[in-house]
């Protein structure tokens, strides 16, 4: 009942915060969010699952209940965690708590509604990572959209309406494509599968006979391929992968800081997490068949995203585009289909969640102080706000993959895994190309830092620049501590747990 | 312990309680004419509707109407088969009672300072009596009487704002088209009687064989009955009255008509077509499969309704046209009776009507709230309301996303089941149209969400009052729309059971 408790606390908290007066909402939401954060950390230490949730592993905190029975297909409440989802749940709860603290400064109107939405989104994100029934999962998946749409649309910047609608339309259409694919797949699986339980579907696909029935006149073999492609496209928008990335910079630039933190920190991971669960777990054959195009897309995302970041002068856009680039690494790791590749990709999901959250917070603090995000307008900020800029520099180093920080381990394992991939033809070539992305990342981050942080102080605004308040800095320090901790002891803290859940995927469900 | 045995006629209690409440209101009105004591009047109506709802739910839990259960609990036949109380009856009684309750609560504020208050509430109760009776009617005569019993008070209710030209005009249009469709309906009844020699639905079904030589006559009769039903459910081509009437009527009445009255129209359509004209026998006699008519009707209704809704500037008209679109979704339940998964698709349509009872009523009541505030009628007038009334606007967002069929909410589930039902029945075109229309509807529903939450108000507004009744009704409707999600299991099972019982 632990997962239910997490979701219930967040949901009730959301309702209470929504109804609370504006003046106490921020503190109230923070207090509420400490409960799921503490609970999930305890769950992390008490975690006793093993194997992969979809391939017959032992789940931690599993619970299952009848929900809706519809003719021959049952829909159940089925949640549980394995080594892949557990870290992501912790990432969600921790990041939401920190995002709430980081909203105290920038959010100054309709606070109770904003914090209510933040807690509501937390409940649904936990649901996405814990749900093991397709319908349940889809409910949470879609429910994430509405609060994010409102957060961008109500509290966002000048072009917030455009950005909110674009975000909503893009991701909703993608969800529909993916939804149709999964439904068709389940119908195509035929008699042994009588529920939408993800383990059942995965079992039928991997260990069973796979798709057998003709659906809507589409032959079984074609159906499996079509479902694979449609799911991949559906998730690719969420990740996002070039060329479906254009909603992301718009959404990021217009979104308020805490929404950006969650968007980059957790929402993008929904896409890669779903890819791992659906595409890369259920369709080993199709992964092999489509490995090269997927790897190509990943590498293009890495390079193109980084080049776009290089061309920006808006700090927030730089970080936003660099997310496209970083998520490209994750997909490369997935398609490598080796322990280090897939494990590293999962590690990188967590690591990038922490680092990008940190970067957006840092940019937010700079913006709060200077009221500009343009690199060209700033210079020598390090003199005036040493702590915040120090953290921005540290975050940038983490982004570039400095050793002893989590980004290094994530990227290194991905490259290592991708290099030795047997599934992916020309794996070394793809890896080498992707590694070139690191150079560009270092380029644009150093470039931006050099112009904003260092050099003589110059700022063309009327605002007095002062040190950031403690509650703006504290969440960033927590994130930095986590990044370093994961960078110093990645194996003990996370990677063993992840590989335990990843290995069954690569062995086709057998040990 | 022996279960308490009640006389058989008590099975009609949900309808009788409405009738009693209406009479009580009349009595009160004659003791204290022109009373504007809103607490007593709205309170009586609310208590009456709640009583009816409680009894209907109790009957369901006690297993009344479940086939194969003996001891006064099974399907209850009354007055020689003129009325029947089965799961279908109870399901729709619940829908009507729910809407009537919400409308009564909301009218407490909406009708503030209005003249004919006692009349208003008793007319609502009478109309609800008619609708609940429609759910139980099992003969073309009782169907017709119930239909008129719900229609006549509705005409008066639509035009009850006597000083408002729109309201009076809407009432007149509604009345004229209603009278015409009643005539068409009665003519259809007489043709069916002429062909089969019976009015009781099972008797018609049993005597279809004897009507072989009157195939054309019977076919014409069926088409005319269909016309009457299409009017009541606001389906194309008899939908023209709906936007006018819904727009002109007081908002709670719009909610009442578009949710409860529509559901009642569907229950008689389901009952008459499944019981009196079993598909195979009827096809043998009239030479054409009547589900075809519903396929066409469903396609045209949902498409036309949604396209018309997408072009509206007036919020109430948009909701009115979208309710035409939703009639099209519900018609899929009948269109899908032709092949495969009968009970599934019909059950899905019933579920949709139940969910619709909450979300659509809630949406119209929100419009009523806006009218109460006097903010205006267009999308632009609704801009930025969430700044002043976040709770009501949050509820409205729930209704709109649910109407659009966005996944976590009740509307998604019923639409999804309709979709699966349509696929299993082989109606691929209809299923595709459902998806396309839902996607289209997201456009205009989210436009209103955008106006409420994202746009800034054009002009400054005075602070808005928080009328208790309207707020209570809206919040309850929103909570149920969300709560139907975890509670969908039993609802779905009951709906499918009820559908399975009437599908041959």
Image (cartoon, grey):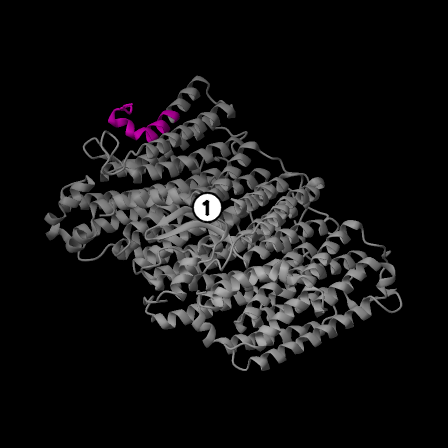
Residue B174 x, y percent position in the rendering = 39, 43
The foreground one among B393 and A382 is A382
Q: Is residue A459 left or right of residue B23?
A: right
> Mark 1 = which residue?
B485
Q: In the image, what residue occupies the spot 39% across and 30% down? A: B54
Q: Is residue B99 visible?
A: yes
Q: Residue furthest top?
A: B31
The dominant secondary structure in magenta is helix
Q: Quadrant of residue A86?
A: bottom right
Subunit that carries the residue with mark 1: B
Q: Residues within 10 Å of mark 1 (few under 14, many from 20)?
A: some
Residue A438 x, y percent position in the rendering = 68, 74
Residue extent of the magenta highlight: B1-21
Residue A308 x, y percent position in the rendering = 67, 73
The foreground one among A160 and B141 is A160
Q: In the image, what residue occupies the spot 64% across and 70% down? A: A411
Q: Is residue A93 left or right of residue A375?
A: left
Q: Is residue A295 left or right of residue B276?
A: right
Residue A231: say if magenta: no
Quarter occupied by the C terminus of chain A: bottom left
Q: How many marks?
A: 1
Report helix, strand or loop for mark 1: loop
Residue A172 x, y percent position in the rendering = 52, 60
Q: Is residue B165 visible?
A: no
């Amino acid at each position: 009942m632990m997962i239910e408790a997490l979701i219930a606390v967040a949901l009730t908290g959301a309702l209470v915060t929504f109804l609370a007066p504006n003046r106490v909402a921020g503190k109230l939401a923070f207090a509420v969010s400490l409960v799921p954060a503490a609970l999930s950390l305890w769950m992390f230490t008490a975690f006793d699952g093993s194997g992969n949730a979809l391939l017959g592993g032992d789940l931690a905190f599993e619970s299952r209940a009848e929900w809706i029975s519809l003719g021959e297909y049952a829909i159940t409440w089925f949640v549980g965690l394995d080594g892949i989802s557990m870290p992501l749940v912790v990432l969600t709860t921790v990041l939401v708590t920190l995002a709430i603290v980081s909203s105290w400064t920038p959010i100054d109107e309709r606070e109770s509604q904003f914090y209510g939405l933040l807690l509501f989104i937390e409940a649904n994100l936990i649901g996405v990572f814990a749900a093991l029934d397709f319908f349940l999962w889809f409910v949470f998946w879609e429910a994430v959209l509405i609060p994010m749409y409102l957060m961008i649309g109500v509290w966002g910047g000048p072009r917030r309406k455009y950005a909110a609608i674009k975000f909503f339309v893009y991701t909703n259409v993608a969800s529909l494509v993916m939804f149709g694919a999964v439904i068709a797949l389940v119908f195509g699986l035929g008699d042994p599968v009588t529920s939408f339980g993800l383990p059942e579907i995965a079992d039928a696909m991997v260990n069973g006979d796979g798709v057998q029935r003709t659906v809507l006149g589409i032959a079984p073999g074609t159906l499996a391929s079509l479902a694979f492609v449609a799911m991949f496209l559906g998730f690719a928008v969420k990740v996002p992968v070039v060329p479906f990335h254009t909603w992301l910079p718009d959404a990021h630039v217009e979104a308020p800081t805490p929404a950006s933190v969650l968007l980059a920190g957790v929402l993008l991971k929904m896409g890669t997490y779903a890819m791992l669960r659906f595409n890369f777990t259920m369709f080993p054959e199709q992964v092999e068949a489509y490995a090269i195009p997927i790897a190509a897309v990943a590498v293009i995302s890495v390079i193109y995203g980084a080049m776009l970041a290089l061309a920006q002068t808006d700090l927030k856009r730089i970080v936003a585009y660099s997310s496209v680039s970083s998520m490209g690494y994750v997909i490369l790791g997935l398609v490598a289909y080796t322990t280090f590749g897939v494990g590293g990709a999962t590690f990188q999901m967590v690591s990038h969640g922490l680092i990008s959250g940190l970067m957006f917070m840092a940019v937010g603090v700079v913006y709060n102080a200077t009221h500009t995000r343009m690199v060209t307008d700033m210079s020598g900020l390090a003199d005036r706000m040493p702590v915040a800029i120090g953290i921005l520099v540290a975050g940038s180093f983490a982004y570039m993959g400095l050793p002893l920080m989590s980004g290094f381990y994530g990227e290194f394992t991905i490259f290592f895994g991708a290099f030795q991939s047997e599934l992916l033809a020309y794996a070394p070539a793809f890896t080498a190309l992707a590694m070139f992305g690191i150079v560009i990342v270092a380029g644009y981050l150093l470039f931006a830092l050099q112009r904003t942080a260092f050099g003589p102080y110059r700022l063309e605004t009327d605002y007095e620049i002062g040190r950031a308040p403690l509650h703006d800095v504290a969440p960033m320090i927590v994130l930095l501590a986590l990044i370093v901790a994961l960078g110093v002891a990645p194996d003990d803290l996370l990677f063993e747990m992840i590989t335990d859940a990843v290995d069954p995927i690569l062995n086709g469900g057998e040990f | 312990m022996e279960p308490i045995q009640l006389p058989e006629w008590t099975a009609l209690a949900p309808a009788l309680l409405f009738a009693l409440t209406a009479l009580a209101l009349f009595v009160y009105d004659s003791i204290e004419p022109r009373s504007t004591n809103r607490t007593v009047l709205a309170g009586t109506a609310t208590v009456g509707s709640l009583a009816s709802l409680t009894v209907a739910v109790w009957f369901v839990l006690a297993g009344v109407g479940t086939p194969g259960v003996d001891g006064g609990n099974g399907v209850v036949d009354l007055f020689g088969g003129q009325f029947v109380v089965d799961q279908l009856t109870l399901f729709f009684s619940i829908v009507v009672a729910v809407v009537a309750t919400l409308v009564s609560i909301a009218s407490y504020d909406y009708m503030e300072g209005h003249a004919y208050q006692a009349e208003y509430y008793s007319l609502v109760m009478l109309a609800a009596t008619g609708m609940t009776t429609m759910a139980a009617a099992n003969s073309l005569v009782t169907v017709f009487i119930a239909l008129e019993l719900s229609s006549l008070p509705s005409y008066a209710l639509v035009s009850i704002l006597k000083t408002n030209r729109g309201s009076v005009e809407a009432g007149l249009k509604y009345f004229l088209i209603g009278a015409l469709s009643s005539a068409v309906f009665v003519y259809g009844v007489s043709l069916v009687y002429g062909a089969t020699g019976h009015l009781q639905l099972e008797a018609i079904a049993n005597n279809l064989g004897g009507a072989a030589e009157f195939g054309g006559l019977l076919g014409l009769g069926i088409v005319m009955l269909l016309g009457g039903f299409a009017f009541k459910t606001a389906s194309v081509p008899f939908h023209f009255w709906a936007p006018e009437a819904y727009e002109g009527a007081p908002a709670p009445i719009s909610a009442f008509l578009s949710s409860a009255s529509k559901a009642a129209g569907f229950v008689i359509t389901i009952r008459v077509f499944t019981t009196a004209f079993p598909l195979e026998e009827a096809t043998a006699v009239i030479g054409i499969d009547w589900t075809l008519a519903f396929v066409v009707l469903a396609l045209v209704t949902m498409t036309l309704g949604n396209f018309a809704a997408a072009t509206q500037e007036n919020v109430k008209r948009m909701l009115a046209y979208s309710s035409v679109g939703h009639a099209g979704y519900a018609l899929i339940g009948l269109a899908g009776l032709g092949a495969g998964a009968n009970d599934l698709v019909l059950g899905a349509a019933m579920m949709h009507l139940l969910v619709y009872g909450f979300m659509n009523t809630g949406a119209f009541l929100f419009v009523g709230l806006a009218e109460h505030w006097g903010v205006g009628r267009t999308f632009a007038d609704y801009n930025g309301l969430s700044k002043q009334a976040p709770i009501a606007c949050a509820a409205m967002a729930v209704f709109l996303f649910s109407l659009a069929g966005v996944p976590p909410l009740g509307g998604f589930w019923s639409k999804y089941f309709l979709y699966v039902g349509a696929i299993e029945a082989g109606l691929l075109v209809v299923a595709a149209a459902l998806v396309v229309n839902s996607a289209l509807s997201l456009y205009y529903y989210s436009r209103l969400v955008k106006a409420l939450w994202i746009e800034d108000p054009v002009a400054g507004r005075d602070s808005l009052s928080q009328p208790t009744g309207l707020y209570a009704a809206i919040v309850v409707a929103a909570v149920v729309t969300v709560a139907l999600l975890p509670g969908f299991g039993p609802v779905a099972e009951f709906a499918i059971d009820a559908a399975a019982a009437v599908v041959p």
